Image (cartoon, rainbow, N blue to C red):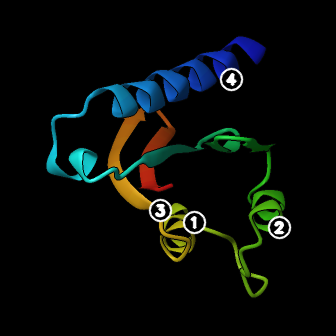
Amino acid sequence: MGNKYLIMLGILLVVSVTSVLVGSNSLAHKGQRWEYGIFECGKEWIWCEPGVLVITSSQRDFAAEMKVNTFGHPISPIQIINHLGAHSWELLTLSELGNIQTYWLKRPK
């Protein structure tokens, strides 16, 4: 279990470093910097961004940790994505492996 999270943190670090080193797009020339986040839902609900790691086994606990008001209803991944969007996160891509969905997001630093 611990190795999975170390791998995710490693991937997040590589993506972040790569975004800094690749200065070829027009936003990079203007000094735009990005930070990246990973949201994963399946058996566990996970949010990982620089300096933050939230891991829960229940949707309710995840919503509480992320400060998402569910109005007492079960939470869905789209509610989390919308919540993150309200905090300037932009969805880059989604990957699925079995019952696990992984969402990759970015926002300006």
Q: Indicate which disc, 3 or 4, sits on the residue closer to the N terminus.
A: 4
69 on left or right of 30: right
Is disc 1 surrounded by few (<14), some (14 to 19) or many (20+) residues within 10 Å? some
26 on left or right of 92: left
Q: Indicate which disc, 3 or 2, sits on the residue closer to the N terminus.
A: 2
Residue that badge 3 annotates: 89
> Is residue 1 positioned above or below 98 on the image?
above
Q: Secondary structure at mark 1?
A: helix
Q: Nearer the viewer, residue 91 or 14?
A: 14
Q: Indicate which disc, 1 or 4, sits on the residue closer to the N terminus.
A: 4
Q: What's the residue type where badge 2 is placed?
A: Ala
Q: Indicate which disc, 2 or 1, sits on the residue closer to the N terminus.
A: 2
Residue at figure coordinates x 60%, y 41% from the top left: 42
Which quarter of the picture shows residue 7? top right
31 on left or right of 79: left
Whole-Å distance between the Cαs marked 3 and 2? 19 Å
Whole-Å distance between the Cαs marked 4 and 2? 21 Å
Which quarter of the picture shows residue 10? top right
Q: Position of residue 63 (x, y in %)?
A: 75, 66
Residue that badge 2 annotates: 64
